[in-house]
Image: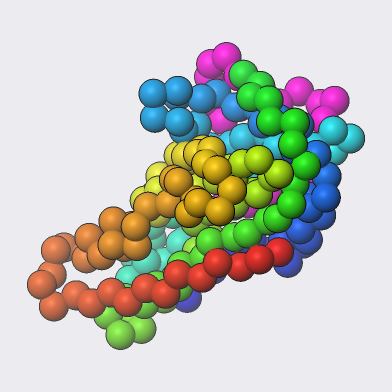
Amino acid sequence: MIHAVFTDEMMELLRAMKGKVFKSYHCIMDNRWHRTEGNVRINLGRSSIDLNCYLHDVDYFGEPEEMAFFTCTSADPKSEFRPYVAGDAQVYMVDEPITGIELVRDHVVHNNGECVIDMDIALVVQTKFHTITFSRGIWYSETIVIAVSNPGEAPASLEPVEDLWYDDAPYEEPSFTTEVERAFIVL
């Protein structure tokens, strides 16, 4: 089984965001596609959180494979943000109180249990006036898609389950099966 989910300690760090002011986020943004590579810093005034999407080695159908998944760490807001890729990092202002935090988690079963994956695919931050979603795309990509939507709307940047997992058959075997359950976890 592949556990590509936030640890309990990481979820506590994310849960503690509720009630704080989401001051800004800091990253190298590809504005055309609203995405960054590898990491983004979430600034909360007196504290910050570095949200990362890095590659990790996993056993995928008995073979070594690289899979990108989320982690997060507490960061000193006075420390320099170090982007994962070269370029000019920008600060994107939000300045809104955080009213809710959700994780989006997929439970994937390939070939009747031959390979099972639990993966957090998005962090959803609800503020007074917006929903800001930090999501990942395909499992081998370090890309973080950042989307801003109105409160109450579905998170804008979530890839449909079918796009993320159903085209994942090794060697394009027609008998390959995939089952996915998507959960929204309120922190």
Q: Per the image, is 87 magenta? A: yes
Q: Position of residue 92 (x, y in %)?
A: 64, 24
Q: Position of residue 13 (x, y in %)?
A: 78, 54
Please state if 45 lies on the left or on the right of 110 as rendered.
right
Residue positioned most to the right = 46
Q: Is residue 107 above or below residue 5?
A: below
Residue 115 makes an appearance in the image: no
Does the magenta run of residues contain 75?
yes
Nearer to me, 187 or 127 = 127
Location of residue 74 with respect to 28 vertically, above or below: below
Residue stretch in magenta: 70-89
Query: Which residue is rendered at x = 27% and y = 80% of the image?
Result: 111
Percent across and percent down for residue 38 are 53, 37
**Residue 34 visible in image:** yes
Image position of 38 (left or right of 114): right
Q: Looking at the figure, which quarter contains the C terminus? A: bottom right
137 w.r.t. 12: above or below: above
- Above or below, 183 against 111 in this view is above
Give the prevailing secondary structure in the magenta stretch: loop
